[in-house]
């Protein structure tokens, strides 16, 4: 199990670093195998920072993140390498994940040299083909191609295939479909749903409410780095209790109505100031927590 307890991240800001910005504030939740947990919130709510801390790309200011009961802060060298065998990330812009002067499948040779140096060529080729087929890619269509010769959807699925080569148990998916066209989005979403069925735990980071509702089992609503509502997706979306969650859902445009001034004002209503401390989460139902107001 992947577990976050009291996780916070504070940055120094200002000309001489005298100010403090709470990017993440006292966040706690668990991600279980075979579960999709969505982190939902507006830009600047701390979603990506949490994902980067899970991947050990950004250090924590406070709190702990543990994997199978082991604090990530204690992992170094070989133990950290083993952690990356099981926990990987895929990010928003697939194009920036590739060096344009190298062929796209160089990402696989890098994995092989780092983690599978003792595997012979035939065994590796078979393993690679299985990973590509698992993400609905034909090896003949993508191997040996440069990034500019492939679509955004193909590049994104190549990154998921790279993660699958490592026999991962958890995937941090940070806005992985926001740069894809509508016809490709559903393919990537269905791929994540298929991986979930295989027992993969997924942290799905998004600002798109409809996507979070579509794919996730558990939803965490973030505002200014703090959790304001959390629980089973059907309860958070079906019976939102916090005013911020209600405002987010009310701001989703309806296809059969025009978006007027009243809706726009309601969607943008809220204080621009960040929170100084996180409010206590109180249960309002089974598997449904809301920040005290």
Image (tube, helix red, strand yellow):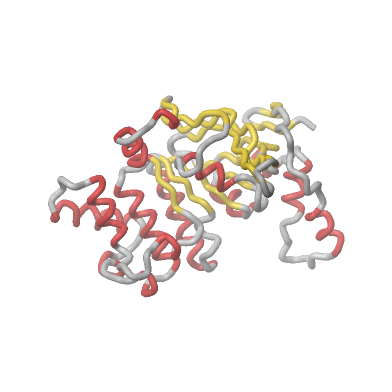
Q: Is residue 266 left or right of residue 105?
A: right
Q: Is residue 139 left or right of residue 220?
A: left
Furthest-bottom residue in this view:
149
- Where residue 157 sits, quadrant-wise, is bottom left
Q: In the image shown, does 49 or 170 lie closer to the viewer?
A: 49
- Where residue 158 sits, quadrant-wise, is bottom left
Q: Quadrant of the N terminus?
A: top left
Residue 7: x, y in percent? 57, 32
Mark count: 0
The answer to whether any part of residue 269 appears in the image is yes
Residue shown at the point (73%, 61%) measured from the top left = 253
Q: In the image shown, does 13 or 40 lie closer to the viewer?
A: 13
Residue 221: x, y in percent? 65, 42
Residue shown at the point (75%, 66%) measured from the top left = 256
Furthest-top residue in this view:
69
The answer to whether any part of residue 221 appears in the image is no
Residue 267: x, y in percent? 78, 55
Q: Is residue 267 left or right of residue 48?
A: right
- Where residue 281 sits, quadrant-wise, is top right
The vertical placement of 175 against 155, above or below, is above
Q: In the image shown, does 232 or 256 lie closer to the viewer?
A: 232
Q: In the image shown, does 157 or 74 lie closer to the viewer?
A: 74
Residue shown at the point (27%, 66%) measured from the top left = 143
Q: Quadrant of the C terminus?
A: top right
Residue 199: x, y in percent? 40, 40
Furthest-front residue in this view:
16
Q: Is residue 222 left or right of residue 33?
A: right
The vertical placement of 244 against 147, above or below, is above
Residue shown at the point (41%, 50%) measured from the top left = 194
């Amino acid at each position: 199990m992947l577990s976050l307890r009291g996780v916070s991240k504070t940055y120094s800001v200002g000309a001489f670093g005298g100010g403090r910005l709470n990017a993440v504030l006292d966040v706690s939740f668990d991600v279980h195998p075979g579960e999709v947990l969505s982190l939902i919130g507006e830009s600047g709510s701390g979603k990506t920072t949490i994902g980067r801390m899970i991947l050990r790309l950004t250090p924590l200011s406070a709190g702990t993140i543990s994997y199978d009961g082991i604090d990530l802060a204690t992992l170094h060298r070989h133990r950290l390498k083993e952690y990356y065998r099981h926990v990987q990330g895929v990010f928003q812009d697939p194009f920036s994940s590739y060096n344009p002067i190298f062929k796209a499948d160089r990402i696989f040779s890098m994995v092989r040299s780092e983690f599978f140096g003792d595997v012979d060529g035939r065994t590796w080729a078979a393993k690679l083909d299985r990973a590509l087929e698992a993400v609905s890619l034909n090896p003949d269509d993508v191997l040996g191609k440069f990034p500019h010769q492939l679509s955004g959807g193909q590049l994104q699925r190549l990154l998921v295939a790279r993660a699958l080569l490592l026999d991962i148990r958890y995937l941090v998916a940070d806005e992985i479909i926001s740069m894809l066209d509508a016809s490709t989005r559903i393919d990537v979403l269905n791929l994540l749903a298929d991986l979930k069925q295989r027992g993969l735990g997924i942290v799905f980071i998004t600002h798109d409410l409809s996507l979070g509702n579509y794919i996730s089992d558990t939803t965490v609503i973030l505002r200014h780095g703090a959790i304001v509502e959390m629980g089973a997706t059907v309860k958070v979306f079906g019976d939102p209790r916090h005013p911020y969650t209600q405002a987010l859902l009310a701001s989703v445009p309806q296809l059969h109505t025009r978006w007027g001034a009243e809706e726009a004002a309601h969607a943008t209503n809220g204080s621009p100031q960040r929170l100084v401390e996180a409010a206590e989460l109180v249960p309002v139902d089974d598997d449904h927590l809301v920040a005290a107001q």
